[in-house]
Image (cartoon, rainbow, N blue to C red):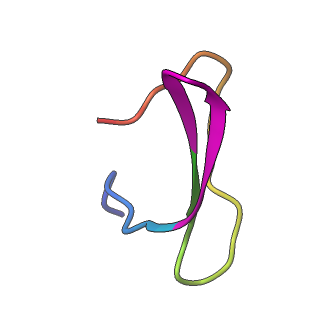
Amino acid sequence: MSSYLTLTVVALTQETPDTVTIHLQRPDGQKVPSKPGQFLT
């Protein structure tokens, strides 16, 4: 299994003037596995 996922940006939320939350979704609709403090590159 590949450690890469293809994700689609489904929404952007402006939290503060300089902070944006990016909402991502997998093509198959499953939950994106994550850990606290994890980041994407």
Q: How many marks?
A: 0
Residue placed furthest toward the top: 37
* Percent x, y of residue 37: 59, 15
Q: In the image, what residue occupies the spot 37% across and 68% down?
A: 6
* Percent x, y of residue 9: 48, 65
Q: Main secondary structure of the magenta part?
A: strand
Magenta residues (range)? 10-21
Q: In the image, what residue occupies the spot 69% across and 71% down?
A: 30
Image quadrant where residue 14 sits: top right
Image quadrant where residue 39 sits: top left
Work out whether residue 23 or residue 39 is closer to the camera in this orientation and state it: 23
Question: Measured along the vertical axis of the image, is residue 27 above or below residue 20?
Answer: below
Question: Measured along the vertical axis of the image, is residue 20 above or below residue 8?
Answer: above
Indicate yes or no whether the magenta region holds residue 18: yes
Residue placed furthest toward the bottom: 28
Horizontal side of 8 relative to 31 (left or right) equals left
Indicate yes or no whether the magenta region holds residue 19: yes
Q: In the image, what residue occupies the spot 71% across and 61% down?
A: 31
